[in-house]
Amino acid sequence: MLVACQSAARPAPAASAPLVLVSFDGFRWDYAARTETPNFDRLARDGVRAERLIPAFSSKTFTGHYTLATGLYPGHHGIISNTMRDPAWPEVFRLSDRREVEKERWWGGEPIWVTAKRQGLRAGSYFWPGSEGLVHGARPDWWHPYDAAVAWDVRLAAAFDWLTQPAPGRASFVALYFEEPNDAGHTYGPGASETMAATRRADAILGQLLDGLATRGVSANVIVVSDHGMAQNDASRVIVLDDLVSLLPGELLEHGALAQIYPQAGREAHIARALEGAHPELAVYRREAVPAHLHLFDNPRVPPILLVPTAGWEVVPRSAMSEGGPGVAAGDHGTDPSHPDMHGIFYAAGPDISAGRVLGAVEQVDVYALMCRLLGIEPAPNDGVWQRIAGAVAAR
């Protein structure tokens, strides 16, 4: 049985409109224009949308969600991928490893739920990546260990409960996470009918959220985002690492839409020389020369050699190849966020949101400051650019 974890309440500040943050994993920027999405259309009509939401690198689930939550680039908050190492300890971070995910040492910056709690608000999260781990010794007042089997309407019911508690125990901030259309995009590809069906399912649950808030008399600001987009893979667009260089066991940490290599002592220069310029669709970066636009800075978790294939290409070891097929998903993400296929969505509506506005491209790092503004709290230091998202706030 799934059990919610709740921490002690603190005195709440003056009441304001609650904020509901919703993520639809892998919802590419153009999906809503490719199928029927009446509830996304409703949000856009009643509030604002951005032309695109540009993710941080790597354009992966944990990285994107924690960037949204903190307003920091991964080089500053430390979650550079779903899989990573830190030179300070031997364990590897993997999103499937519950023990490591919950350890405070991985999580830098200050996520919105900690900012809110620190200033007297109550916060709840249903599966938002990062909310399971301690950050500055805190978690949301309500949180759940991730379990994909939990029905979407169960998640909604919990959010409604948190938002309608008697004061002062009522939630001011709620984060909700839904797996689609990411799962369908991986399995069938971004252009598939199944992925469009998953997009319509996301639209339907959004409608249930909006209608449920209205039925309960909750006048909330609602922000809807995604962590990344999705690129179409193809059997002809696979870079087999073994054809370029011979790696020893343990040197390859991650592969797919990006790859991390940790060479054994004395092998880094040899591996880098073998890979640099070896394939026209593969960018090869040594740790000290990662380009500035990836915003990894000098974070010690950046691997000695980082491989970034062009969107729609995969870099894999031969061991990952399946007989008669490429051994890769039909769709994937994680590569350079400058590519349009990696871009996601941003919608917002509510009493404090502008109506009928279309913003240009905004970045994931911009959303944290907006959330703080809507909650009436002071943001922690962040990398967002207010001018890119200021138009979302209703004029007073």
Image (cartoon, grey):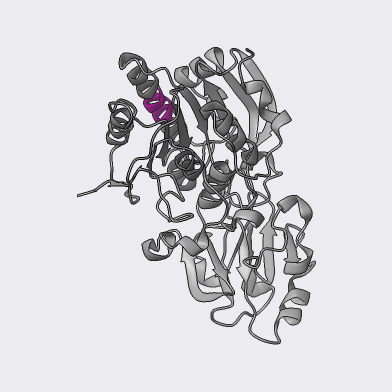
Left/right of residue 389 with respect to residue 142 in the rendered view? right
Q: Residue furthest front?
A: 11
Overall secondary structure of the magenta section: helix
Q: Image point 29% across, 34% down: which residue?
A: 158
Pick the front one: 146 or 120: 120
37 w.r.t. 70: above or below: above
Q: Image point 68% across, 72% down: which residue?
A: 304
Pick the front one: 264 or 31: 264
239 w.r.t. 116: above or below: below
> Where is residue 89 shown, x and y percent of the image?
52, 75
Pick the front one: 178 or 376: 376
> Where is residue 289 shown, x and y percent of the image?
79, 64
Q: Image point 66% across, 73% down: which residue?
A: 243
Q: Is residue 107 visible?
A: yes
Write down the region rendered in magenta. 200-206
Is residue 205 found inside the magenta-colored segment of the image? yes
Q: Residue furthest bottom?
A: 266
Q: Residue furthest left?
A: 1
45 w.r.t. 327: above or below: above
Q: Is residue 323 visible?
A: no
Left/right of residue 334 with respect to residue 130 in the rendered view? right
Is residue 153 found inside the magenta-colored segment of the image? no
Pick the front one: 395 or 85: 395
> Where is residue 125 shown, x and y percent of the image?
39, 41
Quadrant of the image containing the C terminus? top right
> Where is residue 179 shown, x and y percent of the image?
41, 42
Q: Quadrant of residue 315?
A: bottom right
Count how many numbered circles sit on residues in the image. 0
Q: Image point 67% across, 46% down: which residue?
A: 337
252 w.r.t. 372: above or below: below
